[in-house]
Image (cartoon, rainbow, N blue to C red):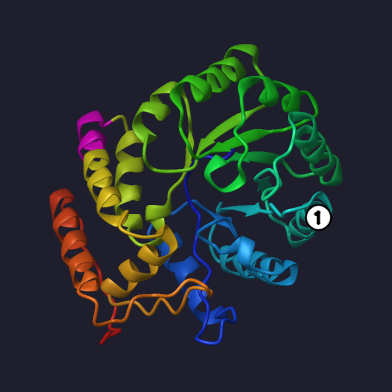
Amino acid sequence: MIKGSLVPNITVFDADGKIDDAKTRWHMRWMFEKGVDGLFLTGSYGAGPLMTHEERVHIFKLAKEVAADFGGKTLFGHVGCVDTKGTVALAQAAQEVGLDAVSSVPPFYYKYTDEEIIRFYTALIKAVDIPVFAYNNPSTTRFTFNAGIVRKLQEVGLKGLKDSPLAVGFLSVVQYEAKHTGKDFQVIIGSSIGWLPYHYMGVEAMIAGMNNYAPEIITHMLKATVAGEKEKAEKAYLTMMKVSKAMHFTDSTIATHMALYARGFDAGFARQPFQLPPFSDPQYANLGKMLQTHFDELGLELTTGDHKIG
């Protein structure tokens, strides 16, 4: 069972588009030190679809190295590719590296039938011995899971679902069916949005993009939730929602890099075609002020680095 707050961590690149090992390691370590429970590697934030097989395996290895210095951190590899063969190969590599579990979006770009999607996951499940999760992210894959497909995949050994749309009708059915039938199956929400109501349903893990740049807020909210401090958890949840809304001015990967720079941390580059705005853009300063305001709301210290932009 995966528990707590994980992060769909960004991959940091240098100006030439190569993985920046030092900055990527620093970012992983910094988040662990701030209370993040695990990494969801090479997903959307992590530029997985923009990377080669070898680059994604390299990120898995970096994560394994960093996590070795911490106890009990979950390493969850996103292995989704456009084809079955590539996905299976990446999942097998993740298992060899020593990751705890893998997840995959359905094969994307083309439109597939339900039967083809089921065959895809069946092949993936049979190829590895570690838990396999499906990742429901219709905005990037053109495919939306339903309860019937989830039931069929449970029969062939699917261990869980990472869900991003958070459609309450669908997700509540999947969660409660697993609970009341005693199935070995876990729902993980792919966002901090919805954390409290879904936690009240019994969901025990989230994969929160905000952990990339404000892990203190997520850790504060999670600790209050687990401790049963309802009022404190709800206040933190409302603050988290305000930060989330303020960050939706551009793609999440770009916004994350910008927020890290706003905190004084050298966040390197995103992989092209992504392009960070020039450091003269006032949005960097706006993000810094926004984060300071909301950290103050919760009585949290907004630590900053010494990297100067501009």
Q: Range of the magenta residues?
A: 229-235
Looking at the image, residue 176 sits to the left or right of residue 191; the answer is: right
Tag 1 secondary structure: helix
Label 1: which residue? 92
Q: Position of residue 204 (x, y in %)?
A: 48, 33
Question: Can you see residue 263?
Answer: no
Residue 71, image x and y in percent?
Answer: 55, 56
Q: Nearer the viewer, residue 116 or 73?
A: 116
Spot occupied by residue 172 in the image (x, y as percentages of width and height): 49, 20
Quadrant that contains the N terminus: top right
Residue in the image at 38% along x and 80% along y: 266
Amino acid type indicated by mark 1: Gln
The C terminus - image quarter:
bottom left
Name of the residue lying farthest toward the top: 180
- In-image side of 3 versus 219 (left or right): right
Residue 66 placement: quadrant: bottom right
- Considering the whole magenta stretch, tell me its main secondary structure: helix
Q: Toward the viewer: 43 or 248?
A: 248
Q: Is residue 11 left or right of residue 103?
A: left
Q: Is residue 122 above or below residue 176?
A: below
Residue found at x 48% / y 73%: 270
